[in-house]
Amino acid sequence: MTKEDINQVRERIEILRREIDRHNYRYHVLDQPEISDAEFDELLRELQQLEEKYPQLQDPDSPTRRVGGEPLASFETLEHKVPMLGLDNAFSEEDLIDFADRVKRLSGLEELDYFCELKIDGLAVSLQYEEGLFKRGSTRGDGYSGEDITRNLRTIRQIPLKLPEEVSLEVRGEVYINKKDFEKLNRRREEEGLMVFANPRNAAAGSVRQLDPRLAAKRPLKLFLYGLGQHNLNLSTQEELLGYLDKMKLPVNPNRTICRGIDEVRDYVRIWQDKKLELPYEIDGVVVKVNNLALQQELGFTARSPRWAIAYKYPPEEKVTRVLDIEVNIGRTGTITPVALLEPVTLSGTTVRRASLHNEDLIIDKGILIGDSVVVHKAGEIIPEVLKVVEDKRSGTEKEFRMPANCPSCGSEAIRLSGEAARRCLNPSCPAQLVEKLVHFASRRAMDIEGLGPAVAEMLYNHDLVRDVGDLYYLNTEDLISLPRMAEKSAENLINALEKSKDNPLRRLLFGLGIRFVGEKAARLLAERFETMDRLSEASQEELTEIDEIGPKIGEAVEQFFKTDETDPVLEKLRKAGVNFTEPKLQAASNVFEGKTFVFSGALNDYTRDQAKALVEERGGQVSSSVSKKTDYLVAGDDPGSKLDKAEKLGVEVIDEAQFNVLVS
Ligand code: IVH
């Protein structure tokens, strides 16, 4: 290879790296992708191949090198050259005024500007860039030194490995996890028998402190940056500082404002008191900073915190209520979960009556007794949770709760498998599990059988009408009318809903069958690849795991499902009843979207951007990256950002993912 040739390759590699960085930024920071996921993957693949072929051109800061390395035994310590201090808190408007009075007194100024930012409820981190390259990052630790979490931070796509300018600086911010991602993460962990995280902040902290960077890469970590450590920039205000970080393509929270005087600060704080519930992430307050950086320096620090800033903390939505009883719930996979029955309380606008206690260890750790007064809140502002016991309120009549040694439904031993926090009932014919399986099968995202909720499912089981999901399709109106409180009309409706559900595509059936670890996404991937139940049932482990995103755990579960003795008879019943066992070919879709333009904003649960785009294009529609008057639909996923505002302003029809699913099905 000649020198010219290698120079050409070098040039191509540089172009690819720049392009990949640019698209990464557009997707993860701006939420304005310009190209499809497939096009992005193609760029990355080309770069990977070139770097493999020409090892002399490899670079540790290449976008191909985000995730990697062996798990660590422990983290190294990194010193903070500029200490990472905390903030003083204000818990009331009076505290805010006191703060402003102090600033006025110390500065001798009557009127001054404050800069207000949201106080993200996550984990403080520091990132060091040297000559524009991301070199290392750490946790706050004790404020003077923290843990070196560089390899985990590199996996966060919002963090640029290279800045647009060759500057050396230390930036500080908060790593967090979105409320919905937290919920999803915990749901998966509960299903897998792992310990659940108490709130998004703990989930973020646990993830960023993972010793295996490959595991950290799978956690939905995000961050916002809001300040500087060591640097030699010449900036005059906090407002300018954040603008500069924006310019450096670092993620900065768009909800920030300058306030002329403390009255405007008070108004801002009042606005976010309610508005905070609409955010996709949790905040616990507003940080108020003196805007002028020279003045900040003049005011300086106390031993613990700066005199130029204060954190206005919203009172956490917490209430005291009583644990009336603790009952156990048996999931469709046999997981036995203790649930606290609470004296009803209102939290963030809804009435809370129950809170999962997850597992026996948690009850022991928190020392919860039946009859205890407890503090409850909503984790991630969604999920009711018992925080702690108010021991002072004990009367001595409280009773200890014991996890049953046997399944309360079928009596078989409740076994705690090694490495799992939960107990399980392993009896596949356990009535409670069967009822839960029926409910899951009928649920909206599975076979969507209206009228088959928990109460009806339980009756069907108790009256010996249904033993498994196959039996559902042999019910007739007379059977149903014989059930207590079942009117003729409801019975007919249910029979019609069952009939209709027979035509569902294979992916819904697969999801509905409740194969372990096979969620909606895996079900769709399997159905699309194998197209029929028969082909899927014969697939080997290797064939199954050939699909991207289907790992050995799912592969094994699928194989096991088709091998289990109980499976065949159920599938036979379904087949004989005429339930569809095939997945319609995507190409067969008609041109229903002819002339229609779609814009996607925010993360979708079921599809990558690329898959969603393919669905639209296969139906003759178009996908655009920005909203205009010509847009027919804006599909708003999680955290939809500014495109949603624009769509609303232009009167473009906004639909959510579920509505999009209806349109494409
Ligand atoms: S400024 C010198 N701005 O709140 C202190 N902090 O109790 C500079 N936090 O440790 C901190 N959002 O982890 C600042 N917009 C924001 C913030 C923020 C969240 C956290 C940060 C800090 C803690 C203070």
Image: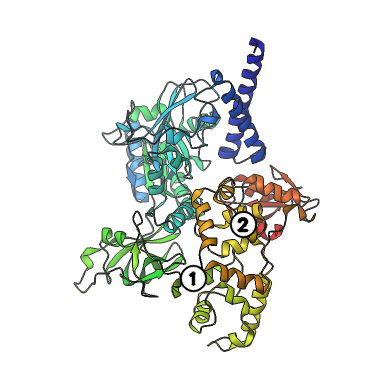
438 shown above or below 98: below
Label at residue 436: 1
Image quadrant where residue 14 sits: top right
Q: Which mark is residue 35?
A: none
Ligand 1, what quadrant? Answer: top left
Residue 430 in percent (x, y) is at 43, 73
Under 8 Å from ligand 1: the CB of mark 1? no
Tally of numbered discs:
2
- Determine the residue positioned at 59% across, 64% down: 446
Q: Disc 1 marks which amino acid?
A: Glu
Q: Label 2, on which residue?
A: 536
Whole-number angstrom distance, CA of label 1 to CA of label 2: 25 Å
From the viewer's side, name the closer residue of 564 and 637. 564
Mark 1 or mark 2, earlier in chain: 1
Question: Amino acid type of disc 2?
Answer: Leu
Judge whether residue 336 can be spotted in this image.
yes
Residue 91 pos. (x, y %): 34, 50
| Percent x, y of residue 98 | 33, 44
Q: Are marks 1 and 2 in contact (CB under 8 Å)?
A: no
The quadrant of the rendering that contains the C terminus is: bottom right
Is residue 203 left or right of 626 when viewed as pictured?
Answer: left
Query: In the rendered image, which quarter contains the N terminus?
Result: top right
x then y, percent, for residue 239: 49, 33
Residue placed at 39% from the left, 54% from the top? 194
Residue placed most toward the observer, 300 or 497: 497
Tell me if residue 657 can be seen.
no
